[in-house]
Image (tube, rainbow, N blue to C red):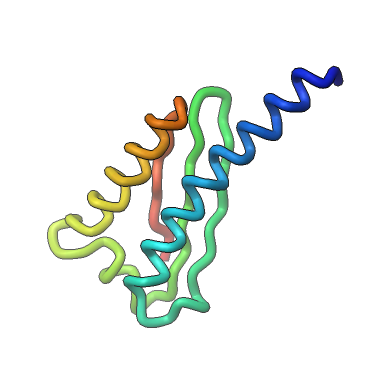
């Protein structure tokens, strides 16, 4: 691998990590059991998927009434992704 491709790989990793950090910060501050929160970042060719796993009792809190909370989290994550010139999806696992 040459230096340019190595730099590109590191910057892509940092982009998805920055978005995951935002999502983690938001979710940890919503749930009752912050220790039960874990994230898995799946990087694809053109976008990333962030799978958020929370305790069973906290799934409803993260989704919110009529899905408003998860919609707001997705909106913030997509806005940051757009500023970083990428795209992201956020999924909640229970």
Name which residue lies at 27% across and 69% down: 60
Name which residue lies at 43% across and 54% down: 22
Quarter of the N terminus within the rendering: top right
Lateral position of residue 61 relative to residue 51, left or right:
left
Name which residue lies at 26% across and 61% down: 63
Q: Position of residue 85 (x, y in %)?
A: 45, 25
Q: Position of residue 19 (x, y in %)?
A: 47, 46
**The one of 23 and 50 positioned closer to us in this rendering:** 23
Lateral position of residue 78 relative to residue 35, left or right:
left
Residue placed farthest to the bottom in the image?
A: 32
**The one of 3 and 37 positioned closer to us in this rendering:** 3
Q: Residue 66, located in which quarter of the rendered image?
A: bottom left
Residue placed farthest to the left in the image?
A: 66
Q: Is residue 91 above or below residue 6?
A: below
Q: Position of residue 41 (x, y in %)?
A: 56, 47
Q: How many marks?
A: 0
Q: Is residue 34 above or below residue 12?
A: below
Quarter of the C terminus within the rendering: bottom left
Q: Is residue 33 above or below residue 6?
A: below
Q: Is residue 86 above or below residue 17?
A: above
Q: Residue 88, located in which quarter of the rendered image?
A: top left
Q: Position of residue 68 (x, y in %)?
A: 17, 56
Name which residue lies at 61% across and 40% down: 14
């Amino acid at each position: 691998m040459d230096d340019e491709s190595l730099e590109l790989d590191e910057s892509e990793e940092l982009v998805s990590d920055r978005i995951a950090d935002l999502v983690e910060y938001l979710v940890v501050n919503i749930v009752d059991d912050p220790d039960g929160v874990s994230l898995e970042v799946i990087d694809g060719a053109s976008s990333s998927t962030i799978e958020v796993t929370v305790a069973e009792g906290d799934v409803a809190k993260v989704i919110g009434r009529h899905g408003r909370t998860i919609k707001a989290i997705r909106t913030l994550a997509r806005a940051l992704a757009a500023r970083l010139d990428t795209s992201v999806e956020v999924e909640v696992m229970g």
